[in-house]
Amino acid sequence: MRSIDPRDFRVARRGTSRAINRQIVLTLVRTHQPISRADLARLMKVRRGAVGLLINELIAEGLVFEGAKGQTRRGRRPKFLHIDSRERYVLAVDIRITRTFVMVADLVGRPLREVTSFPTPRTPPELVRELAQRLLAIVAEQGAGRCQGVGVAVPGVVDETTRRVRHAPTLGWKDVVILEPLAAATRLPVFVENSGKACALSQTWSSQADAKGDIVFVTISDGVGVGVVVNGELLRGRHNIAGEFGHVPLSIEGPRCSCGATGCWEAYVSNLATLSRYLGQTVDQEKSAPGSAVSLTVEDLIERARGGDARAMDTLQSTGRYLGLGLASIINAIDPVRVFLSGEITAAWDLLEGVVRAGVAERALNPSGSDTEIVVVPPQEYPRLRGAATLVVMPTFAAPAIA
Ligand SMILES: [Zn+2]
């Protein structure tokens, strides 16, 4: 149970309980929709009339709508409550070394149209300029007044207060400001967060009744992003750095990492690390850019392995082993109920699961740690974009801070 901090607290005022109940209604509708008023009251263990006023208020504000009569076996058919996404949308952005992805999502994080992408421009000002142009073009088509804001997931450390990107090693960014210029250019609210943290937020937020217990989200791409949710809250630490397991060393003598150190977990399991091992040469941002010397991708490598290329298979298997060893560190440190794993490499999960689990078992301190559930989130579910969308919509649903 969370304790009250005697130096920093807010007293519950009249209306606080109402505000909390309002968030509970919103959260239950979001996670159980479509849901009838009667079922909602049952879930809240209150009389139906007690939730009626709150629901009417949320309907009047356009956050919830009632419709789409459902099927029941007999008797009258109740109306069902839904989160009202009909008039609102959010823009989600996932910035990566080679490409930047954009998704138009509804208030529950579901894509409303096909995800688009463009090559990530070299410098942050160029990126902001191109991104703003593309977002404004979408807004012109979708309707300006209906856009709730822009969520941006970046592969780096984001300052919790200023939202500056302090350090994004794979992008080569240090102390970069994108929030203000993007907000100025689009005239939309902009939210920026580390991609691993955004994924973890979205995962914990979208889960239903099984959301109990601590979770970890690991996203493997050009780098490695990790987000940790403990007691229902994202672990941030003092500088919003907590959870950077990608830069915990597997071996101090290991390969050079994008952060400048050697032997980080990321330097063993990122897409660039896997490709470097396969090609016998260091693959970096320059070399992996489209049209340059190395145009091989992890997807290609998986295809080669499936086609009988033994070296491709060996390479993937060693990445799998390193993946397992690093996951064991996370499991030993956090002891989560579940680890979510995403990234291009998970397309080879059928080939890698055994070796990943063996790696976890090899280092897990508690034998039951090796049973920790590992849930693969496939790339086509766009977890990072869903995470970015969550940054915009979550404040509407978040519990009010009272303690
Ligand atoms: Zn590192």
Image (cartoon, grey):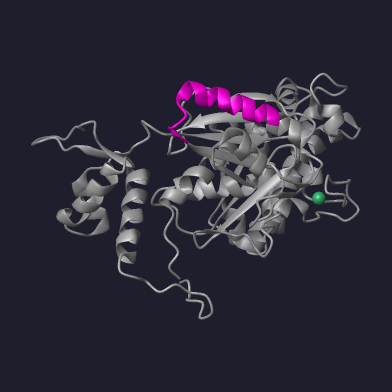
Name the residue: 83% across, 33% down.
285
* Residue extending furthest toward the left: 75
Residue 332 screen position, x and y as percent: 66, 62
Residues in magenta, as a range: 129-147
Residue 103 sits inside the magenta stretch: no
- Where does the image place residue 392, in percent across and percent down from the top left? 51, 43
Judging depth in this view, the residue of 303 and 216 nearest the camera is: 216
Residue 349 visible in the picture: no
Classify residue 75 as left or right of residue 313: left
Q: Position of residue 123 (x, y in %)?
A: 79, 34
Q: Characterize the magenta stretch by its predominant secondary structure.
A: helix
Residue 119 visible? The answer is yes
In which image quadrant can residue 354 be found?
top right
Q: Position of residue 363 (x, y in %)?
A: 71, 58
Q: Is residue 344 above or below residue 340?
A: above
Nearer the observer, 23 or 176? 176
